[in-house]
């Protein structure tokens, strides 16, 4: 099984959690569903009726992600306008006029490592080729379309399954369901641990069907865990969120 590894960077990013209200917070990591959208833009997959998502799911895609830089966040007020039906509709229904100032939380100058594998090797080869040539079908972003991102291929190689009963220093975030329940985490004082819950799979009308709880370090340090599914890609020890 082959795997693509690439670095994803950007000045600002926003990944709105599924449970937020009108003042959006953001995840620290790009969740699986956002990664699917990113890959759909790179490959030029059709967005209509979530076709990109269905095509990637049918390819049995698996995604993993890790941090290269510590998590930094900021809050800024952003003006929202009504753009339904693909045009701007001025309205004076509220005191702020046609624009609605909303406080958004953003991750700042974040760098990620993404790991992508799938059974459809032709699609995986195309992804690696587009990354190598830096030639994407559409512009890519960190969540919202106005938050422009950049990507650089790190490697495209064979995954090796790692069998170990000891702690492994992981280069990727780890689903808590893959960590042993008894002494599965080696707690170290210089690591800031964080757990986030993401939508793992959605159905019609983007209704969540499954979730995944993920453990990682917000200061971009490797966490040591006893994980029941570990792969080695070059010098990276990883697992997948999906």
Image (tube, rainbow, N blue to C red):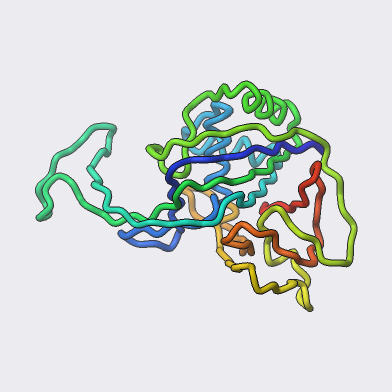
Q: In the figure, is residue 89 to the left or right of 16?
A: left
Q: In the figure, is residue 199 to the left or right of 106?
A: right
Toward which corner of the image does residue 197 lie, by quadrant? bottom right
Q: Residue at the spot x=43%, y=57% of the render?
A: 73
Q: What is the x, y in percent for residue 4?
A: 71, 36
Q: Nearer the viewer, residue 148 or 80?
A: 148
Toward which corner of the image does residue 16 lie, by quadrant? bottom left
Q: Quadrant of the N terminus?
A: top right
Q: What is the x, y in percent for residue 114?
A: 64, 43
Q: What is the x, y in percent for residue 8?
A: 57, 40
Q: Residue at the spot x=24%, y=32% of the render?
A: 87
Residue at the front extreme?
A: 190
Q: What is the x, y in percent for residue 222?
A: 69, 59
Residue 211, placed above or below residue 153: below
Q: In the figure, is residue 213 to the left or right of 94?
A: right
Toward which corner of the image does residue 117 lie, by quadrant? top right
Residue at the bottom extreme?
A: 182
Residue 40, placed above or below residue 69: above
């Amino acid at each position: 099984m082959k795997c693509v590894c690439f670095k994803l960077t950007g000045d600002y990013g926003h990944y709105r959690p599924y449970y937020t209200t009108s003042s959006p917070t953001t995840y620290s990591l790009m969740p699986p569903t956002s990664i699917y959208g990113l890959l759909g833009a790179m490959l030029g997959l059709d967005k209509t009726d979530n076709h990109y998502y269905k095509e990637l799911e049918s390819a049995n895609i698996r995604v993993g992600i890790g941090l290269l830089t510590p998590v930094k966040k900021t809050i800024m007020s952003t003006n929202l306008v009504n753009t339904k039906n693909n045009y701007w509709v001025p309205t004076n229904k509220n005191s702020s006029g046609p624009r609605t100032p909303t406080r958004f939380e953003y991750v700042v100058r974040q760098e990620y490592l993404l790991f992508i594998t799938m059974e459809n090797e032709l699609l995986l080869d195309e992804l690696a080729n587009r990354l190598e040539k830096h030639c994407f079908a559409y512009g890519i972003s960190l969540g919202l379309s106005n938050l422009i991102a950049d990507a650089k291929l790190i490697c495209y190689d064979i995954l090796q399954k790692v069998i170990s009963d000891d702690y492994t220093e992981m280069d990727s975030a780890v689903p808590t369901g893959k960590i042993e329940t008894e002494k599965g985490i080696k707690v170290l004082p210089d690591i800031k641990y964080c757990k986030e819950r993401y939508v793992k799979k959605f159905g019609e009308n983007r209704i969540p069907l499954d979730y995944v709880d993920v453990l990682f370090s917000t200061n971009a340090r490797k966490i040591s865990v006893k994980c029941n599914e570990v792969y080695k890609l070059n010098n990276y020890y990883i697992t997948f969120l999906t």
